[in-house]
């Protein structure tokens, strides 16, 4: 009876197949680490974003909202707000020059606020996307790495047949089964990587949409305040 114990198959495999399996193990380990870290990031981001948005709309003014916003936060909305608020303060420091302009001219100054928030959004999204290309690479490359191990193992089995002079199933089956483990391992590594890459890409798109909506709401709020106060 053939022994299908994975460790036994690994130790009986040739050196090349062993290296392929170890490489796949490294891909798998780092992929699952990325998945774990992404789940932590999205969970914390979702929680802190909900708290920030509620605090922001309940704050008496922007100054109070800024005072209640921590510097160390995972909330994309909070991070773009901090950058937008800082840029808005710079605009207000030049109040005398702005008073000499028309209201449309003053509102046009909000372009710098929007650009600052867009830069912050780009930085936040880059952090969320970090390491995702590795999952994509894992999903696309590991099946072929496993296939290489299989082909090499089958070639080695045929060499054994040549040396032994026998092509019976008892001679061929162990080597072929060891080789096919590499293909199975490649698929085992690739499938979760593809699933989680698509899943996190969807979550990132949602975060990006929520952040973009907050930026638009924030700019509309500033514009209404400027029109109302004539700052």
Image: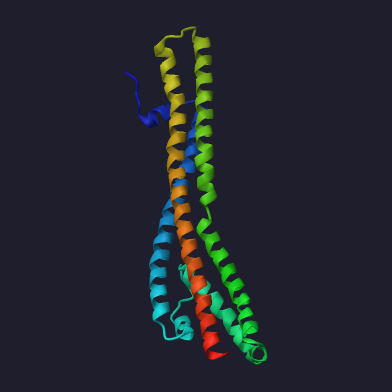
Judge by depth and name the residue closer to the eye, 136 or 108.
108
- In which quadrant of the rendered image does the C terminus lie? bottom right
Q: Answer with left or right where residue 91 lies relative to residue 199.
A: right
Query: Residue 207: where, in percent of width, then height?
Result: 46, 62
Q: Is residue 79 visible?
A: no
Judge by depth and name the residue closer to the eye, 194 or 35.
194
Q: Is residue 130 visible?
A: yes
Residue at left offset 50%, top offset 23%? 153
- In which quadrant of the rendered image does the N terminus lie? top left
Judge by depth and name the residue closer to the eye, 54 or 176.
54
Query: Residue 160: where, in percent of width, then height?
Result: 50, 14
Colouring chosen for the image of the structure: rainbow
Residue at left offset 40%, top offset 12%? 169
Judge by depth and name the residue closer to the eye, 147 or 152.
147
Considering only vertical position in the picture, is 11 above or below 157? below
Considering only vertical position in the picture, is 5 above or below 122? above
Considering only vertical position in the picture, is 87 above or below 120? below
Query: Residue 23: where, in percent of width, then height?
Result: 51, 38
């Amino acid at each position: 009876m053939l022994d299908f114990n994975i460790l036994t198959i690994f130790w009986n495999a040739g050196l090349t197949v062993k290296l392929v399996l170890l490489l796949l193990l490294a891909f798998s380990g780092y992929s699952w680490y990325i998945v774990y870290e992404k789940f932590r990031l999205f969970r914390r981001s979702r929680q802190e974003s909900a708290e920030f948005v509620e605090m922001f709309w309940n704050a008496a003014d922007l100054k109070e909202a800024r005072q209640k916003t921590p510097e160390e936060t995972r909330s994309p909305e909070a991070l773009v707000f901090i950058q937008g608020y800082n840029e808005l303060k710079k605009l207000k420091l030049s109040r005398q020059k702005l008073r000499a302009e028309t209201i449309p001219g003053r509102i046009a100054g909000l372009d710098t606020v929007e650009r600052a928030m867009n830069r912050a959004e780009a930085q936040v999204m880059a952090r969320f996307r970090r390491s995702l290309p590795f999952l994509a690479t894992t999903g696309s490359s590991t099946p072929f790495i496993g296939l290489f191990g299989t082909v090499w193992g089958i070639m080695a089995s045929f060499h054994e047949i040549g040396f032994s002079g026998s092509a019976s199933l008892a001679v061929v089956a162990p080597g072929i089964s060891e080789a096919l483990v590499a293909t199975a391992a490649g698929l085992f590594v690739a499938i979760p990587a593809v699933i989680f890459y698509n899943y996190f890409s969807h979550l990132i798109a949602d975060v990006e949409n929520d952040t973009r909506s907050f930026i638009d709401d924030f700019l509309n709020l500033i514009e209404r305040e400027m029109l109302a106060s004539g700052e």
